[in-house]
Amino acid sequence: MNEIPEKSTGAVLITGLVFLVVLTLLGLSAMQSTILEQRMAGNSLDSNIAFQAAEAALRTGEGVIAGWSTEPTPDGAGSNGVWSLNAPDPHPGDSVNWWDDSARDEAWWSDNAQSASSLSGVSSAPRYLIEERDFVADNLNVGNQNSETGRVFYRVTAGGKGRSSTSRVVLQSTYARRY
């Protein structure tokens, strides 16, 4: 026959409850860590998609330059497909580069940049813009008498977005072309 001792203090019950509380806290901490890691992985994927979209737009802009048979004349509005250097700046006079300043303004990119090929899995089509940077002559002859041959350097700026519109990447390249 089992007899119950007259003086039970319940130490085993209290120890068991403390042990369960500690295990519960460890489980909650592990869940929060897993949720954070999932969010980080999702953001990394979204950033990678935005980078690839911007890279595709950059290559499209470079392909456009490669396809020109004659040198276009740049202007301040990009009407010939080529902007004058730093002409796209929507806020001239501030110390912010135009691509940093306008990267936050979706309407500006839609109005001024060319749309690249549509990609699946992105929130909006990537866009590119071409600026003429400089002409570098092949020789060091100075003067207006000789027709100079050389290369024209262009800056291609491209912007892409990931699955969400908050993930944005802006890339630039310099492309040299001889006409």
Image (tube, rainbow, N blue to C red):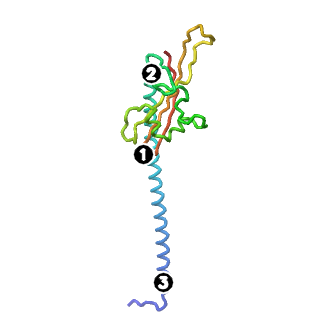
Q: Point out the tag, 1 or 2, that comes first from the N-terminus.
A: 2
Residue for badge 2:
66
Q: Relative to 41, is 148 on the left or the right?
A: right
Q: Secondary structure at mark 1?
A: loop
Query: Residue 116: which quarter of the image?
Result: top left
Q: Where in the figure is residue 69, as x and y percent of width and height?
A: 43, 16
Tell me the residue that label 3 is attached to: 10
How far apart marks 3 and 2 lie (CA) works out to 84 Å
Q: Residue at x 62, y 10 (%)?
A: 143
Secondary structure beneath label 3: loop
Q: Callout 1 environment at 10 Å: few (<14), some (14 to 19), or many (20+)?
A: some
Could you give the CA–CA distance between mark 3 and mark 1, rounded to whole angstroms?
Answer: 56 Å
- Depth check, front residue: 66 or 19: 66
Categorize mark 3 by other alpha carbons within 10 Å: few (<14), some (14-19), many (20+).
few
Q: Residue at x 52, y 24 (%)?
A: 132
Residue type highlighted by circle 3: Gly
Residue contact between numbered discs 3 and 2, judged by CB atoms under 8 Å: no
Packing grade of label 2 (10 A; few <14, some 14-19, many >=20) is few
Q: Which residue is found at the position 50% from the left and 16% from the top?
A: 178
Q: Amino acid at mark 1?
A: Ser
Q: Residue at x 45, y 49 (%)?
A: 41
Nearest the camera: 96 or 68?
96
Which tag, 3 or 2, sits closer to the chain's start?
3
The secondary element bearing badge 2 is classed as: helix
Residue at mark 1: 164
**Which of the two marks, 3 or 1, is nearer to us in this view?**
1
Point out which mark residue 26 bears: none
Instruction: Report the quarter where the N terminus lies.
Output: bottom left
